[in-house]
Amino acid sequence: MLQEIVNATKVKCSPEDLLSEYKRHQVLTGRGNSATLQGAKAFLRKWPNPQDWATQPLANRLAEGSQTNSFLIFLMVHGWLQPGYDYLVNRKLSSFWREIVASPLASDMERFRQGAEAIGFTSISSLRMASQSIGRLLIESNVGLEELGLKDFDELAQACRSRGMQTGQGWRHYRAALNGAHRVLFHLEILDSPPPAWQQPKSFADRVVDVHPALQSTFVSYLERKMGTCNPKTVTGIATRLVHFGRFLSKIDPGLTSLGELDRQRHIEPYLNSVTKAINSKNGEQITTAEQARRIWTLSCFFNDITDWGWENGPSRRLIFRSDNPRLPKYLPRYLPIDADRRLSEALIQSEFRLAANALLLARACGLRIGELLDLELDCVHEVSGNGAWLKVPLGKMGTERMLPLDEETVALIDQIVATRSKGCPLPHPRYGRSAQFLFTHHGRRLSQNALRAELNRASETAGISHVTPHQLRHTFATSMVNAGVSLQGLMALLGHLSAAMSLRYGRLFDTTVRKEYERALDLAKANIGPLPTKRLSIPVVGDQDWRDAPAIKARLGAGYCLRAPTQGSCPYANICENCSNFRTNEASISVLSAQRVDTEILAADAEARGWIKEADRHKKLIMRLDTLIAENMGE
């Protein structure tokens, strides 16, 4: 009979029928007592039509006695009461899962839970998400799971925001539950699209709201124009750097009326100076030279573009020149040494977050950029008859596709990824908009870059190495290929580089020509100087030859001597103490200083004979200093 009762408030039920069904429900669930039954009777005496109770102010509804809580939830899950989203988000439905037994909600809630677990949510997570979002949506909308729509989600979200504004409490747990529930219903093919990203980009008008008023409209028009030729991330970077300039102008010249009034000396040069001292808001440190160059280059392109386009408010003359850009340091690629690379791989293999760990291992095995990695689709592996397996890498930074050869281990790794990814409906491709089955999906959505970075940080800490970025895995792959002797053309194909200069950066790391020249020169130097000492205490001379006659750069020290190969040049620390103004000695050391002076005269003559003029001058300066020290301690 319970399933036959109409699940809607539009069909009236007498208080006696409701009470009778409540008693039946208590027997069925094995719950309830005389107190809850008396609470139900009292409630029905006051509210014969339970829905009338929902019209009361929220404070009155929340003040309802605890004896009626069980009866209220019974009415909700059976469709006789829709208490309002404001009530549902302010009230904990502690006995919800016990009350839905044999209710119209039971089958819908179980279907939702199964759908959530099918895309990777744990049993506990699916329970929590179901009660916090779907349960409340089904109660208030009074429809089945198949009939829920985006409007219902929006109404519950608005109630959560209102609660946050009134109480000062956040609604992060509700927001996460709604976002997850939206994803589950999408993969159950109830909703047509997945949920949007939590953080939606600001409009251009919002981005420039605090810059100089004279620049706002021009900045917005420029950014909208750039959206036609640049990808969204590039335009976001342009907007950020233009805003820095706009804020600077609002401080130094509030009376500026248009871009045409900009002056090189009054506006641009002060800004260029400020860029060199700008602080990174994220870490509190000075921005890098590369970021300084990007800010100046962005501003230069802005002025050049609006001038070329013939915009009326453009500057009348050129304001930024090539010499204004700082010279960028040319760093070598930051690869991982062999031992660190091995330890990091072992930490990733032991990780519990298999999907993210396997993604990083695949990036290391193929040298993929993080964007290329996450854009891989489920059918990315291609078997070529007689030529093995190949990985199709999608369009990346350079806007080109490429094919990478795969070994058996990498193919097995991709098979593991396919087994651990979450199943579900195709997702919209961020580049094309078409639906695609991506290789890396977790909880019904694409694996995020932040998730990969967090897993890499965890693995780096476990491996006992410093902070590692995903791009360093690409550098490590490229370096290993160079060490293995891959050709420049092959390296370009593997990395997807468009110019040889990009790949030659890795050749600078281990240049075999430089190595051969170094070894040849070192062999010649060793031949000239003779055998060098193998132990610190052995005399590095041949036979009975005096050390002062060895064909080396020599320095007499107070308690010994030093020999250096001529190719090494003079030691910048030789006799640094004797020449220091803080050096002190006494009468007991006069004999040592005298012996040092005798040897130094010999070394000066030897250096002159060999044509080492600078070395001879160094010895002569030491002789003068020793004369002074000896004289001071002899009382002369």
Image (cartoon, grey):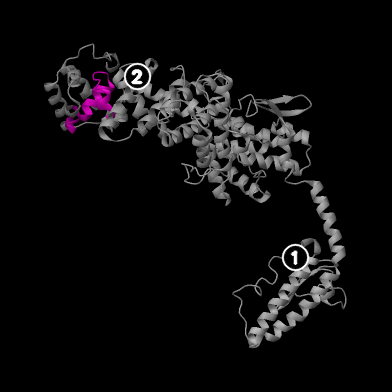
Q: Where on the picture, by quarter, is residue 356? A: top right
Q: Number of marks in the image?
A: 2
- Whether 73 is drawn above or below 343: the answer is above
How much space separates mark 1 and mark 2, taking CA atoms?
81 Å
On residue 152, which mark appears? 2
Helix, strand or loop at label 2? It is helix
Q: Position of residue 93 (x, y in %)?
A: 28, 31
Tell me the amino acid under the disc marked 1: Ser
Q: Categorize mark 2 by other alpha carbons within 10 Å: few (<14), some (14-19), many (20+).
A: some
Q: Earlier in the sequence, mark 1 or mark 2?
A: 2
Magenta segment main secondary structure:
helix
Residue found 15% across the figure and 28% down from its top: 39
Helix, strand or loop at label 1? It is loop
Residue found 14% across the figure and 20% down from its top: 47
- Whether 430 is drawn above or below 619: the answer is above
- Whether 149 is drawn above or below 596: the answer is above
Whether residue 536 can be seen here = no
Q: Is residue 73 magenta?
A: yes
Q: Where on the picture, by quarter, is residue 21? A: top left
Q: Is residue 62 magenta?
A: yes
Image quadrant holding the N terminus, namely top left
Image: magenta residue range: 61-89
Residue found 17% across the figure and 22% down from its top: 56
Q: Position of residue 74 (x, y in %)?
A: 25, 24
Q: Which residue is mark 1?
A: 570
Q: Position of residue 82 (x, y in %)?
A: 25, 20
On residue 268, which mark appears? none
Image quadrant holding the C terminus, namely bottom right
Q: Nearer the viewer, mark 1 or mark 2?
A: 1
Q: Nearer the viewer, residue 317 or 60?
A: 317
